[in-house]
Image: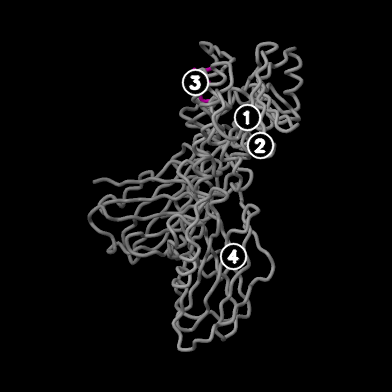
Amino acid sequence: MTSVKFGSPKMILPYEWILKNVEEEEETIASKMILFRGERVFRVGLKNHVESPILFFMAVDLNKIGMRVEGVTYGIQESDNGPATLREMKNENIGSEGSLQLFTMKLAEKITGNCRFAFRICIEGSVPGYVYQLSDRLAKDQLWAAAAVKSQNSVDVEFLVKKTKLFAHKAILAARSPVFATEFAEGQPKEEEEEPKMKRIKRKAIEEPLDQLVLFRSMPEEQVSNAIMALGKVAGLYRIRMEDVNPSTVEQFLHFIYTGELTSTLANEELLKLAEYYQLTTLISLYKTALKKSDDALQMVSIVKSLHIKSDDATPSSTQISPKNNTEILIDRTASTFRCVWRFPMFESVLPNAMANYQNESLFFAYVISPTMGREASIHFSCANLRNAGVKVEEVYMNQRSHNSEWIKMKSTREPSNAVLLFTAPSPVDLFHHECRNVVAFDARIVGTIGNYYYEIMDDAWMKDIWTAATGGQLTDVEIFVGAAEFDVDVVVLFLKFLYTGALVRLASARDKLQLLTLANTYEVETLKNVCQFADRPPEDVEDLTNSLLEFV
């Protein structure tokens, strides 16, 4: 059996809880509710008793913004470099469908004096279709701006909602919703079936509709309106009148169609009605998950049981709020964590094969160094070609899953160049099995240096739907002929797919990179230009490369 290596991006939120002057008396210390994306959803606390102190972390109603906590680790931070060891907190699984998540950890001793707890909160989407993935932020901003009232770039659908006009594009609506696709194909609105009541009035197009996605994705916003005026065309409007729906709800609905992301909480029944009517399956799942509540009484009993302290004194302990001011967890959109998992038989542990690809580059490698000449055995995690991928690796934690729940911070070697970066951690070889039951996980915190090219939680269907509609010729109105010499067909397809999805699926050869960079420059696709420029960097100087390798010997 051979090694199995894979990786996936994770949204991990760091939070630091600082306790000062904790006294000897037994008490419960807790933070105020912690803000995240404008909502009070997290809380940390400590049952600080001599017999069995318990650290706890709570997430309340996080599903109302389409998320849930996958896991929480904590460590006691003794310096600004982060804790050397993190431990996984126990998921208490309070209510299988509830809005409350509780994670606990029994501490070895009571906390006194000053203490800094460092938490790492791993977040995932609350439903399978809502995932953390990489895309061009400009793609979403530009597509949504093209439908905004201030620009009205190439729009051919007008929503009339309580004296408010909202605009959209047939091609995008039809790509994301089978109901819109049927209406536009048949040329008439769908018959009334259910609430909300929506009266649709279609007006025959004045002229041939102009819906050039490529146009407004490849030009600065201030130039788009001038370009449309120069064409001398007026887009014919397919008018949809909606009653008994608030304009803000329709705008939130359209924003999800255009970007695959939520703009506010899911506490809106009108949004569910629109999602069900137009068959947006991910949005329906998100909303129904947000509505699920476990029995409140059962939750409270479960919490009491999980945090119960055995004591001869029946007198309730005092409670302290610390800190007294509000705190907030802010998202660094440039940073994400890449989790690599390596399963291997012992005889393959010394082979530094690629663990996982990141942004289409083989970046991460792991292998075991056997004990030699007095040196203890260790695990190495190497990062290569970082310059080409446009990322920096800040820190790496390692966990030997088959043995304990501790995450050990790996030591970084001196970095003479960006050619190779090495992280190491001690690991007794005799703990490994000779069969393929060895599992090591790595959490590599990476910071992207390519502007607007970040990870975010979004509807996974957003990329697929729009690109599938384009390749299937659904409501397309632009035909592109690829010449025999200047650009290869495959490269043009990559370019168009980036325009539609905001993601680059591959960069194979130097010729591909050069052609793609030329297209990005010609049509002023800023993020793609940056991606190609990083990928097209010249190789490292041989002396720099060998110098960096000598540091690892």
**Mark 4 to mark 3: distance in Å?**
47 Å
Nearer the observer: mark 4 or 3; the answer is 3
**Mark 3 to mark 2: distance in Å?**
34 Å
Q: Quadrant of the C terminus?
A: bottom left
Nearer the observer: mark 2 or 4; the answer is 2
In the image, is residue 535 above or below residue 437?
above
Give me the disc on residue 16: 4
Question: Mark 2 sits on what residue?
Answer: 245
- Which amino acid is tagged 1? Met
Q: Nearer the viewer, residue 442 or 180?
A: 180
Q: Nearer the viewer, residue 240 or 400?
A: 240
Question: Mark 3 sits on what residue?
Answer: 471
Estimate the x, y position of residue 424 in percent, counting from the top left. Answer: 43, 58
- Which amino acid is tagged 2? Val
Label 2 CA crowd tier, 10 Å (few <14, some 14–19, many 20+)? some
The magenta segment is 487-494
Label 3 CA crowd tier, 10 Å (few <14, some 14–19, many 20+)? few
Nearer the observer: mark 3 or 2; the answer is 2
Question: Mark 1 sits on what residue?
Answer: 198
Point out the tag, 1 or 4, that comes first from the N-terminus.
Answer: 4
Point out the tag, 4 or 3, that comes first from the N-terminus.
Answer: 4
**Mark 1 to mark 4: distance in Å?**
49 Å
- Which amino acid is tagged 4? Glu
Whether the residues at callouts 2 and 1 have beta carbons within 8 Å, the answer is yes
As helix, strand or loop, the secondary structure at mark 4 comes to: strand
Nearer the observer: mark 1 or 4; the answer is 1
In the image, is residue 164 above or below residue 201?
below
Q: Quadrant of residue 112?
A: bottom right
> Is residue 225 shown in magenta?
no
